[in-house]
Structures are given as C-alpha cells and as structure tokens.
Image (cartoon, helix red, strand yellow):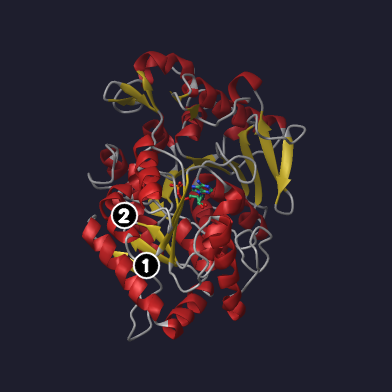
Amino acid sequence: MSKLKVLFAASEVAPFAKTGGLADVAGSLPVALEEMGVDVRVAMPKYGRIKVDGPQAVIGRDVKVYFIENEEYFDRKELYGDKFGDYHDNLERFAFFSKEVLERCKKENFQPDIIHCNDWQTALIPVYLNTLYKYDPFFSKTKVLYTVHNLAYQGLFNKDEFPKTGLDWVLFTIEYFEFYDKVNLMKAGLIYADAINTVSPTYAGEILTKEFGCGLEGVLKNREKVLTGILNGIDYNVWNPAVDKKIARKYSAETIDDKYANKEKLQKELGLKIDRDIPMIGMISRLADQKGLDLLSKIIDELLGMKVQFVLLGTGDNKYHILFEKMAKIHSKNTSINLKFDATLAQKIYAASDIFLMPSKYEPCGLGQMISFRYGTIPVVRETGGLKDSVQEFNQKTKEGDGFTFSEHRADHLFAAIKRGLALYKNKTVWAALVKKVMGLDFSWEASAREYVKLYEKITGK
Ligand code: ADP
C-alpha cells in the first residue's frame, strides 16, 4: 500500500513561530505522524522572526516544513497584529498564504491525499480547492480535513474586503461566507471541508450548542456527520523534566525530591521566600476572558492572603495586566507577576509549581494541564472541553483521579477546588503519591496520531 500523503497547513508551527497551542500541535503532530509511516509535510508563512535560511526546514526525522515567503506580508514583528490591533491586511495575507500552499504542493510535486487545515488562517484552502482549483487534475484526489482549534477566532472581515479572496461575489451568501453582513472565513472552511474535527471529544459536542457555538452552531449541526473530536497530545521529548535543559535540576517520577530544588531556585529567581513547604500555585496563560480570569479576579485577593505563593506568566488584555499588577503590589511577598511571553520561564514554572490553574470558561483542548502532569504539577481545572477529557477529580479514598475540578463557571467553586488542592498538599505522603502518579500518565501524541491516521483513512477511503 502506498504511503498516505498529508500536507499540514498552519499559521504557526513550533519551534519557528508560536503564539499559542496551535503551534505546539503543528510542531508535534506531524512528527508523530511521520513515526506512523505517513508522508507528511508542513506549510507555514515565513515570518520575520524565522531566522532559517532558505525556503524550507526539517522537523522530526525528515518532515519538510515549507515556508511560504512574502516579505511584505510576513516580515513583521508579530504574527497577526500588534498593540494597535489586528493587522489591517490579514485577509489578504492569509488568502495569499492559502493559495500559495496549493501552488507549493505543485512546485514540490507533492500530491497530497489530505490537506490538513487548521483554524481560520487556512480556511480558504478547502474553498479554493472546490472553486479556483476545482478542475485542476493535480488535486483531483485531494481531500481536506479542517481542524478547529478555537471556534471563537473565525477570521471575520468587512464585506468590502471579500474581493481580496479572489472569489466570485456569488459566494457571499449565507450559504457560504456571509455572517451577519461580514466575511467569515471559518464558516466557509467548515462548509467546504470534507471532514471537520476539533481538539477534544467534549469540545466537539459543546460547539453544537448555542453556549459554545459562537454563532456557527447551526453550520456545524449541518455537518455533524463528519464532525469528530481527537484530544491533542504533547511532545513528550520536548516536555520532559528528565532532560529539560531549561530547568535548574532534572527529575523524573523516581526522583521527585529534585522537583523541589527547582521550586527553591525559582523562588530565589523571582524574589519569593525560599521555602519548599509553601504551596506554589502557577498559571501560564494568554490573559483573555476565555481563560476564566474573571473567576480568578473575584477570589485572587483572598487567595493571596493565604499561605501560598502565586506565580503568573502571561500577556493579553490590558484589564488583566492592571489587575495583576495591582495584586503584585498588595501581595508583593508571595506573588510574582510576569506579564510577558517567555518559553524558558514557562518551563521553570511548570517544574517548580505544586498546583497549576486553568479555570477556563471554555477550552477546546488545553495543553497546560498535560504539561503540568508531565512535570508533576497538579492541575485545578474547570470541567470543560479538553480539560474535562484529561483531568479527573482526585478521590482520596479510592486514589482515582489526578487533579481538582469544578463544573459551574463560578468563582466560589474555583476557590473550593483550589482549597481541596491546598488541603491535600499538607498530606505529604498522599501528595507525593499523586505527583508520582500524574507523571506516569500518558498524554503523548502517539494515541492521538493513531486516531488521526484512522480519520485520514476514513476520509480518503484508503
Ligand atoms: P491557547 O492555545 O488557548 O493559548 P493552550 O493551553 O492550548 O492555550 O496552549 C498554550 C500554550 O502556550 C502552552 O504551551 C503554554 O505553556 C504556552 N504559553 C501561554 N502563555 C505563555 C507565556 N506568556 N509564555 C510562555 N508560554 C506561554
């Protein structure tokens, strides 16, 4: 049987460019697919920050990453926008990218069985395949899988920008692109793709409802038969405290005492009291409403009044910057607020913390909880999307479960979950056993990649 050929198109791919979880997925799923015998190539824009010479790079053993070049569009400081907002020409930029992905396949003579698209930036690819490239024999057998990493970011543009897609106005109707008088790229992608998936089974069900559907629940309902959910994994080679060069002391499930050396080192580095007995609560997150910061803001003052240390790393909405800066002033002794993007500090926080917060309002998959597990840090999460699929409340009697969870979007319930964590932390033996247990959980890409291969085979009939 010939190898399955997959072109994976994404607007960000780790380690080249990252603003969020999509980059982690795009940098590790293709590598896992390669291990399963898939001939997979990746395509992404060549942003200014990518210092690789030439039009391609390699990840994994030999997964080619095709850079789509255009200095005017991509040689900028950021990926999608700056402090003034989204770049004004994002529609043009990603329409260009989407078309060039198809042209690059032809140039490389790589005839994909599947083009695996991700989020709104690549949503025009299935549209182009069914319109501008409809009669192009090169793509006659190519199918599209469209993965929704976050339904809230849809690629919405003013109607007068529609011609920049290069498509005929006949497609600007509510059957395709039109969404409350705007252009909605994701909507068209969902309609034209051969199959759709999201990054967790629970989120796949949630997005069919008004609460989580972001206005596209009707479109998704119509496509329910081809909609599935596959939980993301994380790259176990990258996220591994046993080999992590960025942390002070490497450790494994057999040497968890060394985890506390990392805690003391970070306490020193961040100017916190050096004391391994004070529970350290970590949070690494985009500072957006999605992440449940409204709940945290209601309880943070009281929480920081307790015998805990709080370490936050994140950037985002100004209102949260202001809130956390205020907290850092009031509770300067036990609080470290780091309002920036810093991959190295992130690794140190995962290694040093005892508890990791993810009280998200919604969470398509979430990677922080899986990374936390890997570093022996116990997550406190809201039971939504991928958080629900990966974290179960710990039961002290049966020893089942691996974290602390709450269901309703309520600040008092979040606080109660944190308090259950803090209470258990005092029981050193049970806590140590829990740390050891979560470090042994398997959220590597292997199982998820196998599911993707099955899905590709189903779509292509191979
Ligand atoms: P999302 O994609 O919605 O932002 P995920 O939990 O899926 O959330 O992925 C977030 C990823 O980005 C994680 O790997 C997390 O550690 C990382 N991250 C988020 N904010 C920062 C930051 N300020 N500095 C470093 N890494 C960050």
Q: Nearer the viewer, residue 159 or 52?
A: 52
| Labelled disc at residue 71 | none
Image position of 313 with respect to 434: above or below: above
The quadrant of the rendering that contains the N terminus is bottom right
Image position of 30 with respect to 183: above or below: below
Place of residue 141 in the rendered image (x, y in percent of width and height, measured from the top left): 57, 39
The residue singled out by tag 1 in the image is 307
* Mark 2, secondary structure of its residue: helix
Q: Left of 57 or right of it: where is 119?
A: left
Beta carbon of the mark 2 residue lies under 8 A of ligand 1: no
Q: For the residues marked 1 and 2, what is the alpha-carbon distance in whole angstroms? A: 13 Å
Q: Amino acid at mark 2?
A: Ile
* Mark 1, secondary structure of its residue: loop
Q: Nearer the viewer, residue 337 or 15?
A: 337
The residue singled out by tag 2 in the image is 300
Residue at x 60% of width, y 61% of height: 239
Q: Nearer the viewer, residue 52 or 185?
A: 52
Q: Amino acid at mark 1?
A: Lys
Residue at x 55% of width, y 29% of height: 98
Image position of 258 with respect to 89: above or below: below
Place of residue 307 in the rendered image (x, y in percent of width and height, measured from the top left): 37, 67
